[in-house]
Image (cartoon, rainbow, N blue to C red):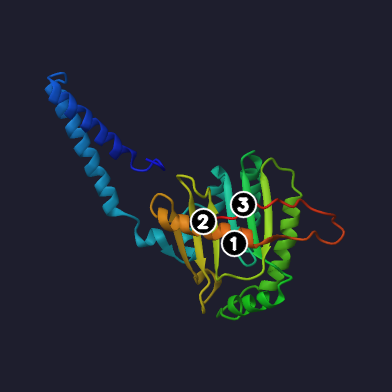
Amino acid sequence: MRHLRNVEVYVAAALAAVFAVLSVIGDIVPVDLRWAALLAAVALLVYRSALETRGPSGDELLGDRVALQETSPPLAKRLETARTVWLFAPSAVNFLTPQVSQALRHHVLSRPEGSVRVVVLDPAATDAVAVAEHQLDDSLDAPLQRLRPSLDTVLRQLRTMDSWPRTGTFEYRVLPYSPGFSLLAVDPGERDGWLVLELHGIRNEAVTSRMHLRLTRRAHETWHRYWLHQYEHLWHQSRPLDPAPGTGPGPTPAPGPAPD
């Protein structure tokens, strides 16, 4: 009951207990009503058991970037109802497309409770960026873009997005190392929350070939929560980006309490 999961099971158990007590103390409850409650409870439990047996299929959980895009609505469409978006990627250039950026602006950031957090690599951490370039660029059979110029482009874009008029909260930071994965979480911690984890690997044919895992709170609560905690630690190990020369001081969000 703590997270409003399996509520129907608790309701069925409560009804069964009530009717059992009433049956013991007398014929208060008509026989027909007892049988109706019993059959409804049994049907509910059988239905619940069928759902748990089915579980998520491999196709729903795993895939490369193309497969996930083909089996899910476009990300810009899914952001129409989102309230919170968390992102980490070495450059985030493949995420912050014009369509997605406008969806963030018109939907998530237009809501008072809307919040967007973005973390990318710290361009000042030259050694870490060089290692990430070797892993992400030199490990591809068919590279289409390079990390360093992509990172420079996204940092300029993030500064521009930070200047947009908005009702929601927009924050971005830089991390001094690459942890070997990218992560996108939409409405983290919510009942319908989901995240996509991209594992960078050692060798890939192309960027789109990397392994992706889609985790929902409903189907994979333990690992969904685990990766949200990973992002929280990542966020607190990152720092707000220094303002670009000539732009003046930008907003510097105060860090919240570090996660346990």
Query: Is 124 drawn above or below residue 188 in the view shown?
Result: below
Query: Three-letter amino acid code at disc 2?
Result: Leu
Name the one closer to the observer, 145 or 228: 228
- Estimate how packed mark 3 is, as few (under 14), some (14 to 19) or many (20 or more) residues with alpha carbons within 10 Å: few
Query: Which element carries disc 3, helix, strand or loop?
Result: loop
Q: Quadrant of residue 143?
A: bottom right
Q: Position of residue 46 (x, y in %)?
A: 22, 43
Kindly identify which residue carries mark 1: 234
- Tell me which numbered mark, 1 or 2, is placed earlier along the sequence: 2
Query: Three-letter amino acid code at disc 1?
Result: Leu
Name the one closer to the observer, 56 or 75: 56
Which label belongs to residue 194?
none
The nearer-to-camera label among 2 and 3 is: 3
Q: Position of residue 151 (x, y in %)?
A: 69, 67
Query: Is 73 drawn above or below residue 90 in the view shown?
Result: above
Query: Which element carries disc 2, helix, strand or loop?
Result: helix
Q: Residue drawn at (50%, 62%), measured in percent from left and top?
A: 197
Kindly identify which residue carries mark 2: 228
Kindly identify which residue carries mark 3: 257
Quick check: can you spot residue 71? Answer: no
